[in-house]
Image (cartoon, helix red, strand yellow):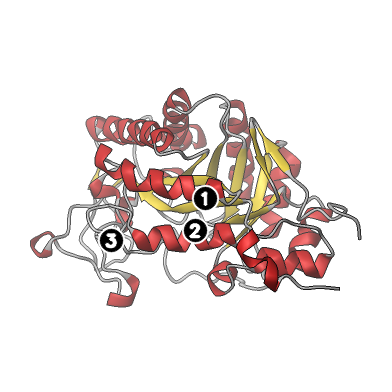
Amino acid sequence: MTENSNRLFRPLKIRSIELKNRIGVSPMCMYSSEDGFANNWHLVHLGTRAVGGAGLIISEATAVSPEGRISPGDLGIWKDEHVEKLKEITAFLEEQGSVPGIQLAHAGRKASTLRPWEGGAVVNENEGGWQPVAPSAISFYEDHTAPLSLDDIGIKKVISDFRKAAKRAKRAGFKVVEIHAAHGYLLHEFLSPLSNKRKDSYGGSFENRSRLLLEVVNAVREEWPEELPLFVRISATDWAEGGWNLEEAVELSKLLLKNEVDLIDCSSGGLVPKVNIPVQKKYQVPFSEEIKRKSGIMTAAVGLITTAKEAEEVLEQEQADLIFLGRELLRNPYFPFQAAQELGAEVSWPKQYLRSRPRE
């Protein structure tokens, strides 16, 4: 097979940025920061995937404010001091030929919890936690303290926090920004009628529920250079009756395209607990296909894509433009090299690793 005759290792240009392949590292929380600061864990974790050949590497959900963290261990970009270490990391990723991206996030009502390996329970304010905020005073779990419903001042602060975070992301050397509007976090909470019961201009109709995300997108785009890509991650469905659904996700994607968003990262779920999700191979790919086909925007597919063949099939069938891998790249950061060998693609290896390159 000749070089780039397959889709997975064909370059992808988005605005001024060219990805060397269609393999992206999906944002995955490491819960390993103190006061939001990146450290050597993040350098090695993300750097290893760059050495391993991924075209795009998006850092974990990075909080735009202290109260926007899921846990006390979340990565942050709410103050200028966070930039220095992030800049070191992005420089290394680019040295390895990968494009560095960052996911800007606010946890909303799912904030102030322990790390998963500590049990994930709510951290009360008297134990070092903080007051979560949300569109409406509705808890994620019934036995949790209700979040504070954001007023106009609080909403303006959220928009401002995302704007400032985008400015810092540019200074830190990131080349792609992704806004996190999925998995039951703040912007998703505004989108879904299950968590948004507001009676003002941010609640009720689809237009109103979409308003905050669009305002955040516009604020970020005003600060983010025109030549650099902007992504949005959404949950295409809540998997719950009366919740956010694929039809609304398509309409939102059309609006996002008009508002200078380049790609939709298509995930699902996370808004409400204990829902029945039909988890199986490539179970979320139909979302990226539908959104791509009906809105005309580029999409990324995620969710139990674990082999080169599966990834290649998604791209061949034009179900997505980009493949994001999560757990598979945790298990095997050198998946891109193995995928290239399996598909017969010619790729560049780090010169330090050339001695291990498979020979015919």
* Distance Cα–Cα, label 2 vs label 3: 23 Å
Report if residue 150 is visible in the image.
Answer: no
User: Could you tell me residue 126's position as x and y percent?
Assistant: 8, 62
Graded by Cα atoms within 10 Å as few (under 14), some (14 to 19) or many (20 or more), the crowding at tag 2 reads: many
Name which residue type carries label 1: Leu
State which quadrant residue 12 falls in.
top right
Amino acid at circle 3: Ser
Dot 1 surroundings within 10 Å: few (below 14), some, or many (20 or more)?
many
Q: Is residue 298 left or right of residue 201?
A: right
Q: Please name whichever residue, 258 or 323, is drawn nearer the observer in this view of the structure.
A: 323
Indicate left or right for 9 with 170 as reference.
Answer: right
Judging from the image, what secondary structure is the residue with disc 3 in? loop
Mark toward the start of the polypeptide (1 vs 2): 2
Based on the displayed image, in which of its 4 quarters is residue 200 positioned? Answer: top left
Residue 41, image x and y in percent? Answer: 37, 63
Q: Residue at x 37, y 49 (%)?
A: 62
Q: Is residue 246 left or right of residue 170?
A: right
For label 1, the SS is helix
Q: Which is nearer the N-term, disc 3 or disc 1?
A: 3
Say which residue appears at 28% left-offset and 56% top-offset.
111
* Viewer-nearest of discs 2 and 3: 2
- Residue placed under numbered mark 3 in the picture: 71
The label number, if any, that marks residue 93 in the structure image: 1
Q: How far across and down, in percent of the image, does residue 122 sit?
A: 23, 66
Query: Where the C terminus falls, by quadrant?
Result: bottom right
Helix, strand or loop for disc 2: helix
- Residue topped by disc 2: 47
Count of number-bearing discs: 3
